[in-house]
Image (cartoon, grey):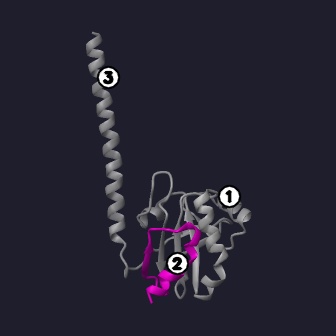
Amino acid sequence: MKNIFNSTHVLLSLVGLMGVVLIFSGCRASKKAANNNLTIGTAAPDFSLVDEANRPHTLSNMRGSRVALYFYPKDQTPGCTAQACSIRDSLGELRNQNIHVWGISYDSPASHAAFKQKYHLTFPLLSDSSKEVAALYGVKGFLMAKRVTFLIDEQGVLVGIINNIDVKNHAQQILSAFEAGK
């Protein structure tokens, strides 16, 4: 009887492990498909999200301006703080180039408000708590969004994707990428 219990326990453990592997491999495949649908020269997917003060922001309302959508993992973490401060410190230069920056993470509006206040951030941080916009842009992670920035021109067309983020110099990456895309 003891051998049957051990065999059954091992079998159930293996079945459970296989299920976990299938779930995670399925997630990876769907993220790849979403990433493959976003290419330079296509229209950026439209969306509406609320910011730290629960004000709605809709991408299509930004036509006529260039937009840098930067997805980041989590408020108040070292890398995300360095990235946000890089943008804060160069916001005047970005705005002189008609570039508006929106930060997007899964954090709540209240978390964004505390983050903005602590680091004196003066650009919108949008709450994607449903993870729908991250999925739309192919950056959805299980617990946090992937760190990726999408550059959108005045007509709403995707003109650049920055995957290798230098958190301390991200504003310069945005400026250089928009300049290269002219």
**In the current view of this chain or complex, which residue is farthest to the top?**
1
Label at residue 9: 3
**Foreground residue, 138 or 55?**
138
Q: Disc 1 versus disc 3: distance between alpha carbons? A: 46 Å
The residue indicated by pointer 2 is 174
> Is 53 positioned to the left or the right of 69 in the image?
right
Q: Amino acid at mark 1?
A: Ala
Q: Amino acid at mark 3?
A: His
Where residue 91 sits, quadrant-wise, is bottom right
Q: Report if residue 171 lies within the magenta region.
A: yes
Above or below for 54 versus 18: below
Above or below for 67 versus 78: below
Q: Disc 2 versus disc 3: distance between alpha carbons? A: 54 Å
The residue indicated by pointer 1 is 110
Please name which of the two marks, 1 or 3, marks the residue nearer to the observer.
3
> Is 73 positioned to the left or the right of 1 in the image?
right
Q: Residue at x 43, y 81 (%)?
A: 159
Q: Secondary structure at mark 2?
A: helix
* Image x and y of residue 168, in percent: 59, 68
Q: Which residues are magenta?
A: 153-182
- Mark closer to the chain start, 2 or 3: 3
Quadrant containing the C terminus is bottom left
Where residue 49 sits, quadrant-wise, is bottom right
- Mark closer to the chain start, 1 or 2: 1
Please name which of the two marks, 1 or 2, marks the residue nearer to the observer.
2
In this rendering, the count of numbered labels is: 3
Graded by Cα atoms within 10 Å as few (under 14), some (14 to 19) or many (20 or more), the crowding at tag 1 reads some
* Image x and y of residue 139, in percent: 44, 62
Q: Residue at x 69, y 62 (%)?
A: 113
Q: Secondary structure at mark 3?
A: helix
